[in-house]
Amino acid sequence: MTTDSDVNKRIMLINGANLNLLGSRDPGIYGTETLDDIVDSARNQAEELGLELRHFQSNSEGEIVDAIARSRGNSGGIIVNAGAFSHYSWAIHDALGAFPGPIIELHLSNPGAREEFRTKSVITPVATAVISGLKARGYPLAVRAIAPLMAS
Ligand code: DQA
């Protein structure tokens, strides 16, 4: 049986489009760490705090919407780097809006300092907080940031 206290100790980390290519994709912008490296560092940070971190990556918008819906009642908080979906996916916006816990929107780069199309995020209005521009360091930082926001 899954109890509320189990749920509130579980973070769902979601990575969206093209983040499977980390390490080889524009390393000057996104850094040299691979997705596995980044997930490991986030998971290690979660475990140090006595939390469990689950991870899901997809290049498909619908799969991300489904993963967010599955997080309802299963995870106490969501950390999400939706990649380019951040800039236009109202479906992901709506899915996150229906999630009851804290949400950290995360970006490796600082999209606000890049091309015009990246300066708007449709996820920000439903996020509790945003972390961007710190490359891989943002991931364990997001775990530390969300931990005290999750109900105990
Ligand atoms: C990104 C920024 C987005 O603009 C871009 O489309 C990505 C990655 C980031 O982590 O900096 O794929 O979300």
Image: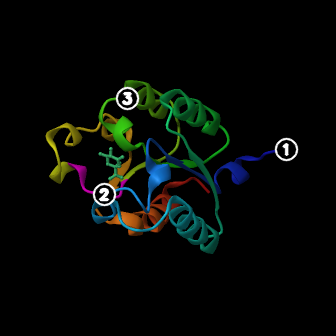
Q: Give the mark toward the camera: 1 or 3.
A: 3
Secondary structure of residue under mark 2? strand
Q: Amino acid at mark 2?
A: Ser
Q: Left or right? Give the position of 78 relative to 127.
A: right
Residue assigned mark 1: 1
Q: Quadrant of residue 49?
A: bottom right
Q: Amino acid at mark 3?
A: Ser
Q: Position of residue 64 (x, y in %)?
A: 53, 35
Q: Amino acid at mark 1?
A: Met
Which residue is drawn at the image coordinates 47% and 67% (left, top)? 140
Q: Is residue 110 magenta?
A: yes
Q: Position of residue 91 (x, y in %)?
A: 43, 25
Secondary structure of residue under mark 1? loop
Residue assigned mark 2: 132
Residue assigned mark 3: 89
* Label 1, ligand 1: CB separation under 8 Å: no
* Label 2, ligand 1: CB separation under 8 Å: yes
Q: Left or right? Give the position of 58 relative to 133.
A: right
Q: Earlier in the sequence, mark 2 or mark 3?
A: 3
Of residues 41 and 29, which is closer to you in this image?
A: 29
Q: Position of residue 121 (x, y in %)?
A: 28, 38
Q: CA distance from mark 2 to mark 3?
A: 19 Å
Q: Left or right? Give the position of 123 relative to 113.
A: right
Q: Earlier in the sequence, mark 2 or mark 1?
A: 1
